[in-house]
Amino acid sequence: MTQYAQNPIMPGFYPDPSICAVGEDYYLVNSTFAYFPGLPVLHSKDLVHWEQIGNVMERASQLPLANAEHSQGLFAPTIRYHKGTFYVICTNVSFGGNYVVTAESPEGPWSEPHYLKGADGIDPSLFFDEDGKCYYIGTHPNPEGCKYNGDWYIWIQELDLERWELTGGQKNVWNGAMRGVHWPEGPHLYKKDGYYYIMHAEGGTGPEHAVSICRSREIWGPYENNFCNPILTHRHMGQAYPIKYVGHADLIETPAGEWYMAMLAVRPLEGYTTMGRETFLAKVTWENDWPVVNAGVGLLTDEVEISLPEWLPEKDSESFTSRSAGKNAVPGSDRHYDFMKMQTLGDEFLYLRNPDMYHYVLEAGKGLYLTATSVTLKEKDSPTYLGIRQQHHAFRTETTLAAQLPEGCHAGIALLQSNTYHLRLEATQNCLNAILCQKGQDSVVGSIELPMQSEQNLQLYLQVSGLTATVGYMVQGKDVPVAQADIRSLSTEVAGGFVGCTVGLYAATEGSAECRVLFTDFVYRHG
């Protein structure tokens, strides 16, 4: 049966994808940086329809993020399966470095991290050879000293999985396909038809990003360059091309012997990327023992032909979606969270750094209580913020804030790129303020008084159309705008970093005393 996957297969902030195939099941993980929980686990049986089945790093003991910058924390995970065990290897650049966690089921629970002594650098991956040996492959600075920024090498070493120790000698095996290459990173090791392949990204994770590959008959090399490198890039397509930054890829093979590649790319508007790096898919064929991506096209396509039977998780009684009674929303979908009826928050929700979960309490018939503290979105701490990924260039969020706020408390909706770049719509006891934060400095871009009674609810909205956001409140179903803001500054090109925007609910106080704020619902819909 032929189907068509729509690119991106994971819209919004789903960077650095790694994918593995286990029989007829496919599992995908992504970087999360300073967000908690870390590393979402997505599952599919047809590469078209996906469900989130959990997060790898869901306990504070697994994921220390204190004082992490927004684009620090967790970098570039890899997911692999070997003899009944799932492995995820990743880098926490804010604590401990490179580590491995394991699970018997991809739904978890996942183990505590096994930190790997001597594993310097970032972007680690695991490879299980036919003789049962496990190898670590990663990237680190040129051991002879970097001659320029990005002068790094890919290295391999055997990993003892019983003692969680690197063993034997470490060998630098490759430093990229191009002369003077910058940032060879995200390496993955594969074996096919007697060849070992290293596929990696190079050129940095921006406009010059590319996927390249080399091969050897021996795992330690020497590795020969593919003369067709890079095997996938959009860096030659010009600044106006709608899909850019293509790279950081991983390969899978289906039971029928077909190959697919998952990779990241961005969809900027007028040169500005607000959603961050997303996950795309491409078809791979092999010619002369080298992979060819989207043969005859050579670029990413809007649709990818998939030769797998259709699988709908909501109709499969064995799926996580069915077994959890729809706990998690479908990636890329519209959402209506009725907090008054929800018993638990879905795995798609994101917090900042290490949250105090007692600050987020669902109460049947009432809604979601957020405990506001003096920690704000501008700090490298864990403010009271509950968000989801921005998934579309045009979308609208709405929420209902119950009753009047206590003095000194403010709450509302935030569109968040980082602690130094974000847009907030804040209700106080008697007014509504729209605040645009740029370079860590607040500017009030709109304000309106609210003649409210203490028993009334306040309906807030934030609507994004491309690079413009409108915020306000609703009265009898009609919008009352408070401000319109240019959100180009909430882009990777201005704010920097590796993240995309999230949007969510927020509460804080001006003093040291905490207060509780009640939200009854939260709506996200595209268009």
Image: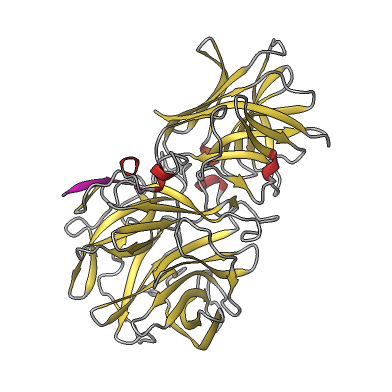
- Say left or right for 458 vs 330: right
In the image, residue 138 lies at what x, y percent? Answer: 48, 74
- Seen from the viewer's position, the closer of residues 173 and 328 is 328
Q: Residue at x 51, y 82 (%)?
A: 160
Whether residue 163 appears in magenta in the rendering, the answer is: no
Residue 466 against residue 245 in the figure, above or below = above
Residue 112 against residue 418 in the figure, above or below = below
Residue 197 against residue 508 in the figure, above or below = below
In the image, residue 222 lies at what x, y percent? Answer: 35, 87
Q: Residue reaching furthest bottom? A: 168
Whether residue 3 appears in magenta in the rendering, the answer is: yes
Figure disc tally: 0
- Seen from the viewer's position, the closer of residues 149 and 503 is 503
Q: Residue at x 40, y 56 (%)?
A: 28
Residues in magenta? 2-9
- Say left or right for 483 vs 175: right
Q: Quadrant of the C terminus?
A: top left
Is residue 363 at least partly visible in the picture?
Answer: yes
In the image, residue 233 lies at what x, y percent? Answer: 32, 59
- Seen from the viewer's position, the closer of residues 215 and 388 is 388
What color scheme is it? secondary structure
- Seen from the viewer's position, the closer of residues 49 and 73 is 49
Q: Residue reaching furthest right? A: 512
Is residue 464 at least partly visible in the picture?
Answer: no
In the image, residue 124 lies at what x, y percent? Answer: 49, 70
